[in-house]
Image: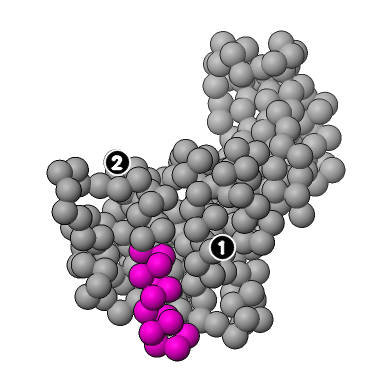
């Protein structure tokens, strides 16, 4: 289901957005605000596991378009998030081994949109992102995905490492993009697989990387030593596609 992306300002408006079932991507509350309406908003946010960020009034003033934020601003998602189980069900419906993208620290919405587009074209069953340090499903992401968001489920999880551990118990192997890893051409990337892509510069987090079964490097011959995250995702995804086609999957 698609939503209109909204910036929601004011206590009553934000509270009503929560109670009406609107998907909230980000919530900002003014430092020091603890009155009744703010406590109600905080309760609703925690009930729905929305990440709260407390910021100075000056920050909210800069974010506000109306100047009447009343100490609270929320950003509504442009698309509804899926559940990880939806992706596994999609794989079963297609009669295919699961193929998932997991993104750790992709904060640029253009990169996120491009990766969702690649995931769709490569036949992946879904994209998993963390709640923190990640772009959400904004209108920019939707536009950059070139329509792929209408077909490729995206789930948001509290802890990416825990999600990996749970999926490993269900028979999925994980490969993490890493410049210091084994050449992707030497790895067996067939079967149920999760492709982990880290943010530009830092790559995947230490714990996320340690929970993966393999690390894959893209051979590079130029003078610089890294690719844009969305390009790296595309290169590795299509090596997985190549191996699947070669194996008849």
Tell which of 240 and 165 is nearer to you: 240
Range drawn in magenta: 236-249
The residue located at (62%, 43%) in the rendering is 143
Q: Position of residue 23 (x, y in %)?
A: 72, 45
Crowding around mark 1 (Cα neighbors within 10 Å: few <14, some 14 to 19, many 20+) is many
Crowding around mark 2 (Cα neighbors within 10 Å: few <14, some 14 to 19, many 20+) is few
Label 2 – label 1 distance at C-alpha? 25 Å
Q: Is residue 229 left or right of residue 71?
A: left
How many marks on residues? 2
Q: Please, what secondary structure does the residue beneath circle 2 have?
A: loop
Q: Is residue 203 visible?
A: yes
Q: Is residue 192 left or right of residue 131?
A: left
**In terms of sequence position, does the residue under pointer 2 or pointer 1 come before the other?**
1
Q: Position of residue 119 (x, y in %)?
A: 51, 61
Q: Quadrant of residue 95?
A: bottom right
The residue located at (82%, 42%) in the rendering is 19
Tell which of 73 and 103 is nearer to you: 103
Tell which of 246 and 64 is nearer to you: 246
Q: Quadrant of residue 12?
A: top right
Q: Is residue 81 visible?
A: no
The residue located at (61%, 49%) in the rendering is 146
Instruction: Name the image quarter holding the N terminus.
Output: bottom right
Q: Please, what secondary structure does the residue beneath circle 1 have?
A: helix
Closer to the camera: disc 2 or disc 1? 1
In the displayed structure, 118 sits above or below 229; it is: below
Q: Is residue 40 left or right of residue 159?
A: right
Tell which of 4 and 36 is nearer to you: 4
The image's colour scheme reads one colour
Which disc, if any, is residue 120? 1
Residues under numbered marks 2 and 1 in contact, where contact means CB atoms less than 8 Å apart? no
> In this figure, which residue is indicated by the disc labeled 2?
201
Which disc, if any, is residue 32? none
């Amino acid at each position: 289901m698609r939503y209109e992306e909204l910036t929601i300002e004011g206590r009553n408006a934000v509270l009503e957005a929560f109670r009406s079932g609107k998907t909230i991507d980000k919530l900002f509350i003014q430092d020091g605000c603890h009155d009744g309406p703010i406590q109600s908003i905080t309760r609703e946010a925690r009930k729905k596991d929305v990440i709260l960020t407390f910021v100075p009034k000056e920050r909210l003033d800069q974010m506000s378009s109306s100047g009447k934020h009343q100490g609270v601003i929320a950003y509504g998602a442009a698309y509804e998030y899926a559940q990880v189980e939806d992706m596994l069900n999609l794989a079963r419906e297609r009669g295919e081994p699961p193929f998932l993208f997991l993104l750790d620290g992709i904060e640029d919405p253009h990169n996120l949109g491009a990766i969702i587009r690649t995931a769709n074209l490569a036949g992946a069953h879904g994209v998993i992102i963390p709640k923190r340090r990640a772009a959400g499903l904004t209108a920019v992401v939707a536009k950059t995905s070139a329509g792929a968001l209408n077909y490729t489920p995206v789930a948001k999880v509290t802890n990416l490492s825990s999600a990996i551990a749970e999926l490993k118990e269900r028979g999925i192997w994980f490969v993490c993009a890493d410049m210091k890893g084994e050449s992707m051409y030497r790895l067996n990337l067939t079967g149920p697989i999760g492709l982990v892509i880290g943010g530009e510069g830092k790559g995947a987090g230490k714990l996320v990387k340690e929970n993966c079964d393999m690390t894959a490097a893209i051979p590079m011959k130029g003078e610089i030593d890294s690719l844009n995250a969305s390009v790296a995702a595309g290169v590795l995804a299509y090596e997985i596609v190549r191996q699947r086609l070669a194996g008849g999957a």
